[in-house]
Image (tube, rainbow, N blue to C red):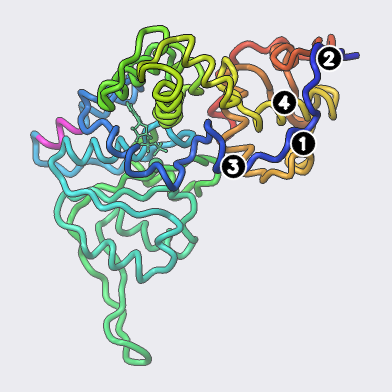
Amino acid sequence: MTRKKHTEPAVAERVEFDERAVAARELSTEKAWQASLRPKTFEEYIGQKEVMDNLRIAVTAAREKGRTLDHFLFAGPPGLGKTTLAHVIAEELGATLHISSGPAIDHFGRLASLLTSLAENDVLFIDEIHRLTPIVEENLYPAMEDFKVDTFIGEGPHAKAVTMQLPRFTLLGATTRMGMLSAPLRDRFGFHWQLRYYEQADMESIVRRSAGLLGLPIDERGVTEIARRSRGTPRIANRLLRRVRDFADVEHDGSINGVLAASALDRLAVDHVGLDTLDRAYLSVICERFDGGPVGIEAIAASLSEERGTLEEVVEPFLLQIGLIARSPRGRVATAAGFQHMGLVPPPKAPSGGSTGGQGRLF
Ligand SMILES: Nc1ncnc2c1ncn2[C@@H]1O[C@H](COP(=O)(O)OP(=O)(O)O)[C@@H](O)[C@H]1O
Ligand SMILES: [Mg+2]
């Protein structure tokens, strides 16, 4: 039996994905200012130490020896710095960066024109690379392996198939869904780097850095509060910082302290660990409607009128990471910590929780 300590609607009103203060995806209105906060060099890029140590060596070696950098794949939830890394790598190599994405390269012609526009040692970044069509993907293989592309000269019945030699280039791929990437594509990358949610100390450095760039006075408690509620995700930290700044302007002297940040974030419905209405609705469905689970993702998605992909990509990885849910062969279960977070008494069967380190398992 579970008992409520306070009333929370079993299913919160449907929250438009794009309106979430903690949406990890980039909102259409914030592209420009988020980009202005982007670190440009290895020096400025905070955290992800393991990935960065290796990348720094690979990039330095390529630059010093005049070699083309290997193709690399970056995986991880939205907002952790994959696109930023592509910019940093090109900058550090002194190379030209070309940016495209899986959905944008919707037929072979687009791929061919993209590839034939590259110069020696250029960097091509393909975001959401798991969304390439199989035909485009197959045509990418010879480009990655042998720097060749098959193309046609002329039109109609007189078209002639020719193989074009491409300059040596570096392909950087990014994906939020490692599991959706085909094995042949995955295998053609020299390395896969899994980006992790950032530690609290790194999140604090990111908030401090962004506040500095925005010319925003903020004290250490304000930094801690915003960092703690940003789900280990720099994009969210930057967004919450800007939202809190509005409160500071209207209700204070423009500067941010811990009390102001906490009260602003409470009012933005971002709780003390960074969960928002959708996360809490998700947890509430498992705990209350399905008695703690196990429950399949489809059933949860139907209860929330939310897309399964949204839940899998942005809600679940973080809840798994902080140990509020766990996965079992029969579906998702709420942990004891998950029940407690919702102010509920956990049933004896609830797993104990704690960090599962399980973020990778969803991809
Ligand atoms: N390591 C980092 N240090 C500081 N800021 C970062 C870092 N990674 C990302 N950011 C900030 O977060 C924002 C989102 O990063 P982005 O690279 O677009 O994420 P992704 O491509 O993984 O979705 C960037 O605009 C940048 O301001
Ligand atoms: Mg990106």
Q: Is mark 1 within 8 Å of ligand 1?
A: no
Q: Earlier in the sequence, mark 4 or mark 2?
A: 2
Quarter of the render that holds ligand 2: top left
Which amino acid, by three-letter code, is at mark 4?
Leu
- Image quarter (top left, top right, bottom left or bottom right) of the C terminus: top right
Vertical position of residue 354 compared to residue 318: above or below: above
Looking at the rendered structure, the secondary structure element under dot 2 is loop
Q: Residue at x 9, y 41 (%)?
A: 66
Q: Earlier in the sequence, mark 2 or mark 3?
A: 2
Using residue 146 as the reference point, say whether residue 350 is left or right of it. Answer: right
Cα–Cα gap, marks 1 and 4: 13 Å
Which amino acid, by three-letter code, is at mark 3?
Phe
Looking at the rendered structure, the secondary structure element under dot 1 is loop
Residue nearest the observer in this picture, 302 or 177:
302
Which amino acid, by three-letter code, is at mark 2?
Lys
Image quadrant assignment for residue 271: top right
* Region in magenta: 59-63
Vertical position of residue 190 compared to residue 352: above or below: below
Query: In the rendered image, is residue 194 in sight?
Result: no
What is the crowding at mark 2: few (fewer than 14 residues within 10 Å), some, or many (at least 20)? few
Q: Would you name the residue on which mark 3 appears?
A: 17
What is the crowding at mark 3: few (fewer than 14 residues within 10 Å), some, or many (at least 20)? some
